[in-house]
Image: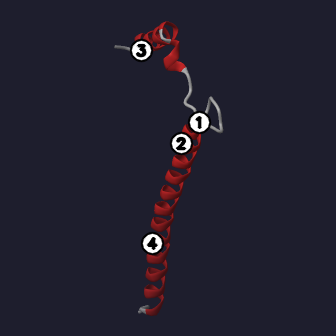
Amino acid sequence: MNRAHQIFLAIFFILIFPDIAKACSTCYGDPNASASQGMNWAIISLLGVTGGVLGGIISAIISIANKTKNFQQTNKL
């Protein structure tokens, strides 16, 4: 199936079944609904966890770089 067929099928299904093209309650809907608030907190939690893990990896890399730099300075020939 080539790209043109995929685009045609996507447009066909959107026209035939317009309900599948609607956005979720976070993007489209009542912002005060409990489902929207739950989705917002889920997004914030995932961003926090991802940021924490990436921050830990970056700090580990910086720590290793500093230790290597200090080791090379103290053991010069």
**Tag on residue 60?**
4
Instruction: Tell me which label, 2 or 3, sits earlier in the chain.
Output: 3
x then y, percent, for residue 43: 53, 47
| Residues at marks 3 and 1 touching, judged by CB atoms closer than 8 Å | no
Question: Amino acid type of disc 3?
Answer: Gln
Q: Which corner quadrant of the image does residue 25 belong to?
A: top right
Q: Are marks 1 and 2 in contact (CB under 8 Å)?
A: yes
Secondary structure state at the residue bearing disc 3: helix
Q: CA distance from mark 1 to mark 4?
A: 35 Å
**Secondary element at tag 1:** loop
Q: Disc 3 vs disc 1: which is toward the camera?
A: 1
Q: Where is residue 53 drawn, in percent x and y?
A: 46, 62
Badge number at residue 39: 2
Q: Which residue is mark 3?
A: 6
Query: How far apart are the two marked residues, 2 and 4, measured between alpha carbons?
Result: 32 Å
Amino acid type at mark 1: Thr
Q: Nearer the viewer, residue 39 or 76?
A: 39
* Residue 26: image tag: 1
Q: Quadrant of the N terminus?
A: top left
Q: Which class describes the residues within 10 Å of circle 3: few (<14), some (14-19), or many (20+)?
A: few
